[in-house]
Amino acid sequence: MSEPRYKIVFDGALQPGVDLTTAKLNLADLFKSDVAGIERLFNGRTVALKRDLSHSDAQTYLQALNKTGIDARVETETVIDLNLSDVHEQSAAMAEPDSPYAPPRASVGENMPAFATLKPFSVEGRIGRLRFLAWTMVLSLVTLPIVGVFALMALGLVAGDSTTGLIIGGILAFFLFVAFLIVSILFSVQRLHDIGWSGWLWLLNLVPFVGSFFPLVIMVVPGNAGANRYGPPPPPNSTAVKVLCSLWIVFFALIFVGGMLGGISAIQEEYESSVESSYDSGSVNTDEIGVEVEPPVISSDDAAEAAQPPVDSAQE
């Protein structure tokens, strides 16, 4: 009598306290598959993850699967006698399509595109670091000329009526700022999706101190290489994206160098001014201390007159 064989089955149940998304991500990592392919295992039907196992092998597989958070179980494999012709005819269809251990030709889930479609003005999708910098550069290049046009319009209106010019200029500047802010938020949300983070984390920009360095985190942290819960990876960077990203980096470098030089120049001018002020103050005090007052010269006649007693005019 042959040794009994076992199979590992799964019906979509999870272990207590395990989140569904976490379990899917763990299974995708275990099976070296994408999340979309794992979705098929959670359709409510009982699927066999692995068949024809010995008892020890089945327990080993079960422990590995339970660590992902799913509630799989071991069942005895039902022995069915099949003709060799039936096996050849149905081998392609019966190659365990529901198992992630099936050969690559067996489809685990629905076919997904290799790369996501770019949606600049949407909260859905993903963009990488270079594309994020390039899109931000384009947004800035588009916004600056519009600001210049609004400024010229305001100046022209100010020449005629200052109140009207200020009101119109303020309204246009407000709407432009709102549009710029909304588009920049959409770019940041897609960048967060590429990292695998929630778009709500953009609100950290509003937190004191954290908001000062969080934009740098968004620009530096690399995205997920494969598909994540927000979709497939973004398409490869084009030449235009690389050029715009390089210009943005050069622009940041020029601002940094200019700020450093300006700070050094301001410190140097302040130092020279303090030195000159100290020097001027010290020279005045020296002159005042060095002044000598000479006593008046008194002649002998003046001394004699001073020694005689005063004569009363009444006696005279």
Image (cartoon, rainbow, N blue to C red):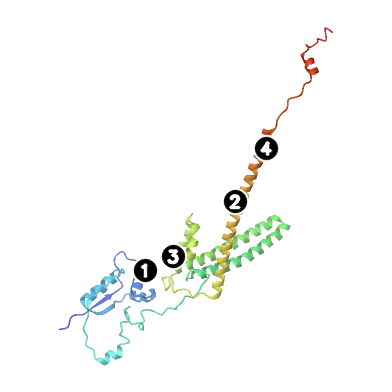
- Where does label 2 land, which residue? 267
Specify which label sits upstream in the sequence, 3 or 1: 1
Q: Which residue is mark 4?
A: 284
Q: Residue at x 48, y 64 (%)?
A: 218
Where does residue 15 sit, x and y in percent of width and height?
A: 29, 67
Badge 2 amino acid: Ile
Instruction: Give, as a three-letter code, the residue at label 3.
Output: Ser
User: Which residue type carries mark 4?
Assistant: Val
Instruction: Looking at the image, tell me whether mark 1 or mark 4 is earlier in sequence order.
Output: 1
The local secondary structure at tag 3 comes to loop
Q: Earlier in the sequence, mark 3 or mark 2?
A: 3
Residue in the foreground of this view, choosing between 266 and 149? 266
Mark 4 Cα shell of 10 Å, populated few (<14), some (14-19), many (≥20): few
Q: Are marks 4 and 2 in contact (CB under 8 Å)?
A: no
Mark 1 or 4: the one toward you = 4
Residue that label 1 marks? 21
Mark 3 and mark 1: Cα distance apart in space: 13 Å
Q: Earlier along the polypeptide chain: callout 1 or callout 2?
A: 1
